[in-house]
Image (cartoon, coloured by chain):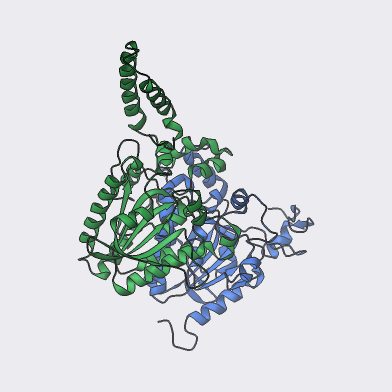
Amino acid sequence: MPEGVWVKCVGCKRIVYEGQLIENARVCPHCGHHFAMTSAERIAFIADPGSFAEIDAALTSTDPLGFTAAKPYAASLAGAREKSGLAEALVTGRATVAGHQVVLGAMDFRFIGASMGSAVGEKVTRAFELAVAERRGVVFVIASGGARMQEGMLSLMQMAKTADAARRLSEARLPYVSVLTDPTMGGVTASFAVLADIIFAEPGALIGFAGPRVIEQTIRQSVPKGFQSAEYLLAHGMVDDVVPRGQLPARLGLVLDYLAGANGGGAR
Amino acid sequence: MTRRFTMEFERPLAELEAKLEGLRRIDVTANPELSGEVEALAKQIEELRERTYRDLAPWERVQISRHPDRPKTQEYLDTLFTDVVELHGDRLFGNDEAIIAALATISGVRTVVLGHRKGKNTRENLARNFGMAHPEGFRKAIRAMRLADRFGLPIVTFIDTPGAYPGIEAEERGQAWAIAEALSVLAGVRVPVVCVGIGEGGSGGALAIGFGNRLIMLENSYYSVISPEACASILHKDASKAAEVASCLSLTADRLVGLGIADEIVAEPLGGAHRDPAGVMGAVKERVVAALRDLLPLDAEALVAARHERVRRVGVIEEGAG
């Protein structure tokens, strides 16, 4: 993008130049609002330079149910691929983070709201399996609207599949750190995303199971301000910490140090 | 004849039945010309009944799955099991009436029973939150799963929920965290897990106690990633398109057997399980006991591995070159 391009910050309504955003890891220099990042930006920001090697790059969902209600799913998939240049809503690969050998995954909200269908579930599962096979830790940067409804029960079952895979990593005593970013909802929150040893969240991120609109329709009143924000979840004991993006790489490195058996004991 | 709750698609049939009932109250000996009419109407009703209940559309099955007179978890527990010891509470926050956990015996087999608990009437439904669990419900289930694992008791679950409760308190107490943990624990228990879909299988709240070594579904039960109404309101901004969406979601028992997610179907009488609760519950008992007999000889590792393989293979993907 050219230097001169600017956006109005949704946090403080001030003008922010694209160049400033790139320099500042897409955090508003005025108010600290965290803008969304693509999976590629996430990986470049967290992985040690040049360390990321993608796996399962061409793995993708099909339209197994022939889902045609409203917009045909096949068309949604084609549109998402064109818009994002990605095969699916999750990018995974081997990487080092602060020198630690890990499997790193980042979800991409541009791809059908980073919803989890068969392909995302399969990639998550393979990431955990690769980590077990190669004795690596796992780092996932999460963003998702939830299970991908256009694949019906095949999507719902990915919750069980990924939860099972995370459990097997845990049984192998390998570390798993997840970073919940805006938004993390539904079936992704309620499966592998929160089964991590350490859960970090980005400031202001919306995180939960049922979305605010669904809740408002159910209880017929509006939800309180700040409901389901990262800070709200921290106060209710659901995440280990809220970490501003600028501090995230160092913080990930530090917890991976601890979980790798910093004193020569622990995980083997 | 007691008034029965009439589902939308049954209305034309119900109207004819009411008309017939009216005619039959009239003294036919005084009006001999009516006997022919009664006979014709009875025949018409039989034909319509056949057409109404054969080849039900997915949305019609969803309506049957929600029928208020349909046998519920509590009835299965009371009817099919003996020596029941209900286990209350999650030892953390409270006791959620929307999920039941119990020690219970079926055909001589000691088990842990888990189930979503809908009520039979408004009073019961208010107490049980219409079978929609809060985190403490799932955490009670997790506690019972761990108990089953420690003491080698097979787990039998009854799935019947519109979904996990979408409310402020539920989110505050970690609804997603509770469901995720239930999935993880259920995947890892070293005992047989037999699940029975008896009514509604609504999303993550159903899945939390809804996968195992065997999934038996009643003919008119459903299991879905999202309720047809919620899906319709997201896709069409119109919940009344639920019928169309229900056909797309592949949520019926036969479709789920086709997708390799459900294993077997228990047939229901014409019109639904509420027409013959005892018969349906008896058939469920047979299948559950048969499944337990198949699974009980397997050792712990084989059971966990089998459950893992079942979930591991679910999904349809394409791997392009590159």
On the image, the x and y values in percent for residue A149 come to: 48, 47
Which quadrant of the structure image shows residue B116? bottom left
Instruction: Please tell me which residue is depicted at 33% across the width and 59% down the height of the picture.
Output: B212
Q: How many marks?
A: 0
Is residue A139 shown above or below A185?
below
Instruction: Please tell me which residue is depicted at 48% across the width and 49% down the height of the picture.
Output: A148
Q: Residue furthest top?
A: B33
Question: The chain shown in green is which?
Answer: B
Is residue B304 shown above or below A74?
below
Residue A57 seen anywhere in this rendered image of the structure: no
Give the position of the N terminus of chain B as an image quadrant.
top left
On the image, the x and y values in percent for residue B146 come to: 37, 71
Question: The chain shown in blue is which?
Answer: A
Instruction: Please tell me which residue is depicted at 33% across the width and 10% down the height of the picture.
Output: B33
Is residue B251 shown above or below A227?
above
On the image, the x and y values in percent for residue B238 come to: 57, 37
Q: Which residue is more in the foreground, A140 or A40? A: A140
Give the position of the C terminus of chain B as an image quadrant.
bottom left
Q: Which residue is more in the foreground, B52 or A268? A: B52
Q: Which residue is more in the foreground, B45 or A103? A: B45
Q: Is residue B200 left or right of residue A52?
A: left
On the image, the x and y values in percent for residue B34 come to: 34, 14
Residue A194 seen anywhere in this rendered image of the structure: yes
Q: Is residue B304 left or right of residue A46?
A: left
Is residue B42 shown above or below A31?
above
